[in-house]
Amino acid sequence: MEPIIETRDLNKSFGSFRAVSNLSFTIGHGDVYGFLGQNGAGKSTTMRMLLGLIYPDSGSVFINGTEFNNSRRHLLSQIGAIIERPDMYGYLSGWDNLKIFAALSDKNIKAPRLHEVLEIVGLKGREKDKVKAYSQGMKQRLGIAIALVHKPQLLILDEPTNGLDPQGIAEMRELILSLSREHGKTILISSHLLHEIEQIATSMIIIHKGKKVVEGKVNSLLNPDDSLVEVVLKPTDDITTKLASSAYYDNIAAFQPDMVTFKMNPAHTPALNRWLVAEGLDVIEIRSKHSLEAYFLSLTNDSVIKN
Amino acid sequence: MRKLLGILAVCLFVSIGTIKASDADKLYYSLRTKVLSVKDYTADVRMKIDINRMRIPQLKGTLFFKSPDKMRLERHGGLSILPKKNINLTLSNLMPDGKVTVIDMGTSTIDGKKLRVLKVIPEDELSQIILAKIWIDEANMLILKTETTSRNDGTIAMDLSFGKYASYALPDRVIITMDVKDYKLPKGITLDYNDVPTPPTPPGEKKSKTQKGTIQISYLSYDINKGISDDKFKDKE
Amino acid sequence: MIQLLRIELYKIFRRPRTYISFGIITAIVLVIQLAMLSDGKSFLSFIMSGVNEQFDIQGNVLNGYLVTYIILQSLLIHIPLLVALVAGDALAGEANAGTLRLLLTKPISRAKLVLVKFTSSVIYTVLLIVWLAVVGLFGSLALFGQGDMINLKSDAFVMLLQHDVMWRYMAAFLFATLAMTTIASLSLLLSAFADNSIGPIISTMGIVVVITILSNLELPLFDKIKPYLFTTHMIGWKGFFDDPIPYGAIGFSALVMFLYTVGFLATTIFYFNKKDIKS
């Protein structure tokens, strides 16, 4: 089966700034793909190139094996997308917005389908309200409804959790998972909330400074043994000797007098804690970094990604 | 001898002139009486105003006249335009009234008709009219052309043609030729759409500020001496 | 295309801002009509002083037709702003609101979107002019009555018989629509360049004002370019109130504005087709 998305050597510069550089990747059917990168790494630019919003300087995009530029209209009818904020016509109701964008989708979409997607995204009952009165979460949901309404195979969601509160983020996570599992959509999702992506993505692509760093199945890329466990301690003089003679010596990834970082499976944290206490060290805090975050940091090795 | 002959000739000329002058006086006064016999009239008219820089279509209307000097054009709700002159543009107004000096200028042929030409000078020094020249069809006792020089309005010429109202000395058609001053509006007010660029004035040729304009009035029918109230001539705003 | 146009018109006419223009036109027209009702006579004697010196004009000079002409003369200069409010907003407003990227992820060609935006702007313009005709012409006729129309040019006095005026207004409104269509296409072009609507609206007005000044400057330097400036031709509607009507000049004006419109529209499509949507 052809990949649903394939990019070949995409390049894009804005002035002297190289936003995307020789980017090639493929996305298969049915997966949830995490598209990761720091702010400014080129995620949005790439997603816009997939949708024909931005023209690559060179390289090409294939959707279902067809070159995008050769069949733009047909291919766009198979894609639903939210790019950055889900901006809509605030002076119109949610229903009007949905109806407008449904009418633009090249398919004859009737009212029952509109009700159906409103049900899916959980906006039923609020569709007659003006969009300007919607919360950010409701706008995101309406955005997804608009992306879904014409039953596309592929959803491209750029930062769909942006601006949502923790509950909203959790609800969005559930929604995306159900779209993938119950509705069989292929989803390309970008986010900087790495642990969110970790919970829903089956595959991922990480780009850094416009270049692909890694691409593959989450399971095969992320090894729990590579997680980072940070231990905040009360500094003592003999801490180095105690650590040097311990079984955890090989796991030390970084050392500071008041904080030691171990590279290890978070499942072993209780044992580590018992050993620290037994050695008479005063433990103030132990925290484990998610494996994706750790992995991401190890690959991009730049500034810290904020949660 | 030569001197004597000269005096004789002058005497002869003066005496002939005097005889002629009395004929001419008679002619003029009887013509004036005829013209003045019309005290008022209401006429259906067609009026064509042809004045440089004034583009006015043919106007149909009713012309009211009341002796001596009241005139009004009524246009069934439309606008009436008449030149504003110190003397009214009626035949009776273009013929000097009161005591006049009439000089017979002999005859002149216009359109194949032999016409007597009179010069009429009012004796009243305050009269608007300084001089009137009148071409007369003696056989029909009709004035076919006048040229009146006035104190303030320059020279006004009138060409008349007569038909069935000739017995009242009322013409079927009058063409009035007069002096019209140019006017100009500041451009800012009008924001003109200049379809045709104004042709430049040739050097040395001064644009004259006064130009000739004509008004042609065709009288279709008259109602004569039926009495018209003065109210008819008051401004209706 | 029809579906897209219906949606576009729906968006335009569901937006309260759209009706501001109709309100502005009504307000300006009413103000001029009231001013003419209260002080029209002295205004008239001021502008007609040159003619009144020599001619005695009687009747309803200050009738609905003349008042409409005065309204159009002062208002048609401002209507470009109202047209720009919608046409300048057409693409830039969507870019600013962020809806443009959502629109363009739908299967619509960009050229079609530009054409639809243009068409809807023209429809809006037509409605503005129709509204102007209703409140300006028919309103004035109701208030001031009918009559022969006097048109004062700086070098001529034109009088039109009342039965001969209405069709001239219809032709003038049609011409004004073409002129405003040119403005709409200019505004749309500027709208394609911008990501917020203030820029194109102000730029449209700026361009119109600057070129109008150039059109009206009596300098030999500008005489050569004047016939090619669209603002020179925007007042071509006045030609219909002349006698004889300068059909040749009006036709040329219409042609110039048509060519400008096509040029602006083609440039908009060309540019917008290549534009990266970063908003």
Image (tube, rainbow, N blue to C red):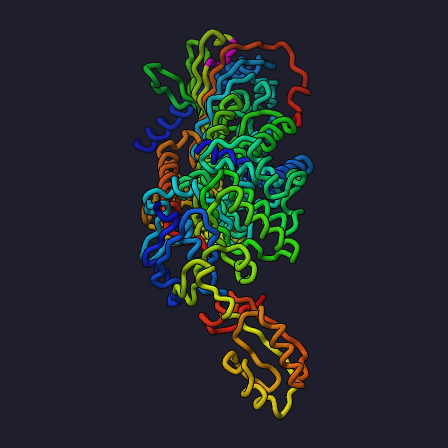
Counting the numbered discs, the total is: 0
User: At which x and y percent is residue B40?
Assistant: 60, 14
Query: In which image quadrant can residue A124 be found?
Result: top right
Residue C218 visible, this angle = no
Report the magenta stretch's main SS: loop
User: At which x and y percent is residue B236?
Assistant: 66, 25
In magenta stretch: residue B171: yes
Front one among C94 and B83: C94
Q: Which quadrant of the figure contains the N terminus of chain C?
A: top left
Q: Would residue A270 appear left or right of A210 to someone viewing this image?
A: right
At 59% across and 88% down in the image, what residue appears? A242
**Residue located farthest toward the bottom when viewing the structure as drawn:** A237
- Is C112 situated above or below A232? above
Front one among C40 and B35: C40
At 46% across and 19% down in the image, what residue appears? B174
User: At which x and y percent is residue B187?
Assistant: 49, 45
At 46% across and 54% down in the image, what residue appears? A33
- Is A68 situated above or below A11? above
Query: In which image quadrant can residue B160 be found?
Result: top left
Front one among C204 and B172: C204
In magenta stretch: residue A54: no
At 60% across and 88% down in the image, what residue appears? A239
Q: Would residue B201 appear left or right of C40 to someone viewing this image?
A: left
Front one among C177 and C60: C177
Q: Which residues are magenta?
A: B168-172
Residue C132 visible, this angle = yes
User: At which x and y percent is residue C38?
Assistant: 69, 37
